Amino acid sequence: MALIVSFVFLAAMLFKRAGIGVTLVSTAILMSLLSMELPQVGEAWVQTTSDPVTVSLVLVTFGIMLLSLLYKETKAIEALSESFGGLLKNSKLIVSALPAIMGLLPVPGGALMSAPLVEKEAERLGLEEDKKTYVNVWFRHIIFPVYPMSQILILTATLTQVSLTSIIISQIPVVVAMAVVGYFVVLRTARVNDEGVQMPRFRENLTSFLVSFSPILIMILSVVIFRIDVAVSALVGIVTLIFITRPSLQTLKKVISDFSIYKIALAAYGAMLLRNAIIFSGVSGILGQAVASSNLDEVVLLLALPATLGFIAGLPTVGIAISVPILAGSLTFTGSSASLLFMSAYLGYLAAPTHLCLALTADYFKCSLNRAYKYLAPSLAASFAVALLAYYIL
């Protein structure tokens, strides 16, 4: 009963468009109060708050969001996108690569940042509004499954206790497939109109790109090559960007006082609190036994549960935070199973009509969601198939 009431409450909060952080924390508190004695509730709260894993996840989320806002407020993101676009001579490359580059800054609804940049090149390709919507949303999101600073990926690795590297390796084929699918669905038949286009100034654009991209590059290299803690790497990226852009004190105050940073950090904490509430209350054990006795195949569970939750909530964090403690009772996570869980929640979220990037992009290009789904649906189906194939092979 506690589970049903909590999930109904969760759905109601999401329907009311309450912040995801407030929603997850509130749901965790409600589930705890309905299923545990007060001493247990306090224990779950203290353990979550003092857990080094939780602290690290919150700091990472805070740092990445802070870096994203610094890029925006210092105009470094404009220099990055314009110089990168200037390095490419092919409009097809620009409309696919620019959203992906912007995707390195995982700001909620961030596809709206790349929409004006994509629009110019998409018009040269003769793309209609539904195709503009598709390329902006699709290519923005193909980078996250292999981006080591992705908050969703870090959350998955944290909850499943599987190394970030092993999950990323398992998802490389899916990302390659998503890029190929995106090209064949929309870009293959597009024709470029180069009339009146000037050749880009390569040297100037390369210099500008390397400078503006260096904070992100240093951050990624710190994690992947030097194995530095992700939270520390995010701090290094922030310091590097501040050194390059020399923002005013007023700009720094504006960034620090932006409430969206704290809402995203709260969401990370809420995911961990909800996970512990499910475990401490015994709900995960009950559901785990039910799942085990159902004789459903592991693959079906890894596909259906996270994808459904991600689609309903329009948020991959919800699908992952709820699925992991439930499935942990019936299976041991590996790189391939954690990857399939991530991709299921992620692709379910991409398909959701409440997905903020999709909604905002469709609104920007004045395109109905039905028209966008004409291209999204087959792309998502193909991506699910490749994710499943990678699970069996890797």
Image (cartoon, grey):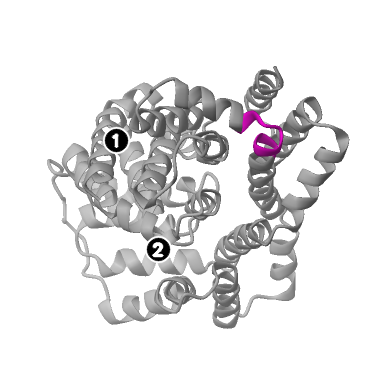
Residue shown at 21%/39% (left/top)? 186
Q: In the displayed structure, would residue 71 be above or below residue 350?
A: below
Q: Nearer the viewer, residue 375 or 225?
A: 225
Q: Which residues are magenta?
A: 277-284
In percent of width and height, residue 303 lies at: 37, 32
Q: What residue type is disc 2 on?
A: Ser
- Answer few, some or many: residues within 10 Å of disc 2's Cα (few below 14, many 20 plus, some between 14 and 19): many
Q: Please give the residue where the numbered disc 2 appears in the rendered image.
A: 81
- Upstream in the sequence, badge 2 or badge 1? 2
Residue shown at 43%/54% (left/top)? 103
Q: Are marks 2 and 1 in contact (CB under 8 Å)?
A: no
Q: What residue type is disc 1 on?
A: Phe
Q: Nearer the viewer, residue 327 or 313?
A: 327
The answer to whether residue 294 is seen in the rendering is yes
Q: Quadrant of residue 302?
A: top left
Secondary structure of the residue carrying tag 1 is helix
Q: Please give the residue where the numbered disc 1 appears in the rendered image.
A: 384
Q: Nearer the viewer, residue 42 or 16?
A: 42
Q: Mark 2 and mark 1: span between their CA atoms?
A: 30 Å
Q: Nearer the viewer, mark 2 or mark 1?
A: 1
The answer to whether residue 19 is seen in the rendering is no
In reply to whether residue 279 is colored magenta, the answer given is: yes
In percent of width and height, residue 346 lies at: 42, 40
Q: In the displayed structure, would residue 281 be above or below residue 74?
A: above
In reply to whether residue 282 is colored magenta, the answer given is: yes
Residue 307 located left or right of residue 128: right
